[in-house]
Image (tube, rainbow, N blue to C red):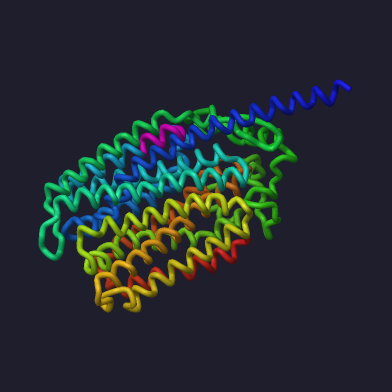
Amino acid sequence: SHAPASERRGEGRGAATARGAMAANDRQLLILSGSFFLLFLAFSTTQSLESSLQTGSVGTMALGTVYIVLTLSSLAAPRLLQAVGVTRGLTGGATTYVLFILSNLYFEWYTLIPAAVVLGFGAAVLWSAQGVYISALAPTEELAARASGIFFAIFQSSQLFGNLLAFCVLRSGAGTGGGGEVAQSTVNLLFSIFAISACAGTVLSSTLASVESLATVRPGGVGRADSSLDAGAGDQHDSEASQSLTEAQDHAGQVPPGAARLGEEDEPGAAPHAEAYVVRGEPPTMSTVLVRERTLLFLLPLFFFNGMEAAFAWSDFTAEVVKPLLGEAYVPLVMMVFGGSNALSSALLGKAGGKGPRSARNLLVLGSLLQVVAVLLIWTGVVGESLASTGQRWFALLVIALVFGFADACLNTLTTALLAARFRSRHEHTVKLAFAHFKFWQSLATGAAFFYSAHVALPVKCAITIGSGALGLAGLMGSGV
């Protein structure tokens, strides 16, 4: 008669411990999200204004440089994270954003291009570290979707508040002419404020707990995140396989290899478990992980489309659609709607994505289709100079901004949740490689789009974006998620 009572007390203590662990992890998630909010309140707004606010093509060339260097650096980011640790990677990567924003105070090619190179390298480290940190905080598919939704809701809201801040500052210094030109002193004031915000985000990131100290909440109890995720170089690298295999054995029956993605459905043609070929002395690389992980291979076009649609919204939409129709000073106001839609959609999608892979896939298809239709309306001139009245222009542009925000939220929030859940029971190096591939193809597309932006007509850019969307949808449908 005492056994059931004893078991109940044990279960009660276990539940209380799990709740405490989740609360502790939630605090770290909010710190991470707050850090990115402050950092990207500055950078995202700078990015969307670079092509419309600054004169010449130096701004778009600098952004192109950022993303091309980010692409190349993504190849080395997983190894670098192993050497410096995830939390130090987050803080070091954030510092490079501060340098780039400060370079806008002296807007010349010899300040922007070197700062862009440094930022590209730092961004690869930052985003790879972010993906690993989210995975450590959320080891199950439900928690992965929840954590991704919370993070991206806070992160994407930075665009709302950043553009609202930019609109208020720029309107105070706008001229009285029809073009709404802004004084250079006002532009410098805006970038000074952005630099302060980025510095605050960098300092906040330095307060994050190490991955090693994070509690891992699993169906069978509470453990610790794999210490090798946040360790430095040396013998730690050699012990990765045995540590990961031990953890997998400890949780056998709780996190089976077949459940390494959203939902419980079997994946057709699933690759061997990552630990299997690590133990055989064959650690995965950027190329071999694509051969052994069919889902990741088929998702590459979707990653690429994510980069293309983001570049179109940040550069072409602002410079060639919003600015000619409404004026320079109103670009932040339209992008504020984009940011608000992005943030709200991310929060809602985080909950919807936890319902299973089919739900996440359907929402990804919906977001991608809406993005393609919106770009098609711009391509055909339905949204353009044919809109005679100011009211029509405002309505059309705000609707387009809402659609762009929702689509971008789908492609970021749900893709991140899918990757975190798909690879959560794999060796931690495979997790790093999956997110490195995400940023590699995303940034490659964004960098290419920024580079050709100043040399290609708007209809051609619309066609390229729509074509990449079609390929992304085809890859998603063939991925088996």
Residue lying at 85% horizontally and 23% vertically, measured from the top left: 3
Residue lying at 59% horizontally and 30% vertically, measured from the top left: 21
Residue 444: horizontal and vertical position, in percent? 39, 57
Is 312 placed above or below 46 here?
below
Query: Is 254 left or right of 32, judged from the image as shown?
Result: right
Query: Is 179 left or right of 256, judged from the image as shown?
Result: left
Magenta run includes residue 189: no
Magenta run includes residue 90: yes
Is 297 placed above or below 206 here?
below
Is 34 placed above or below 257 here?
above
Q: Nearer the viewer, residue 379 or 352?
A: 352
Q: Main secondary structure of the magenta part?
A: helix
Residue 470: horizontal and vertical position, in percent? 48, 70
Query: Is 459 left or right of 105, judged from the image as shown?
Result: right
For the record, the magenta segment spans 85-93
Tell me the quadrant of the picture where the N terminus can be found.
top right
Residue found at the far front of this picture: 391
Residue 409: horizontal and vertical position, in percent? 45, 55
Residue lying at 25% horizontally and 44% vertically, measured from the top left: 101
Residue found at the far top of this picture: 2
Does residue 236 appear anywhere in the picture? no
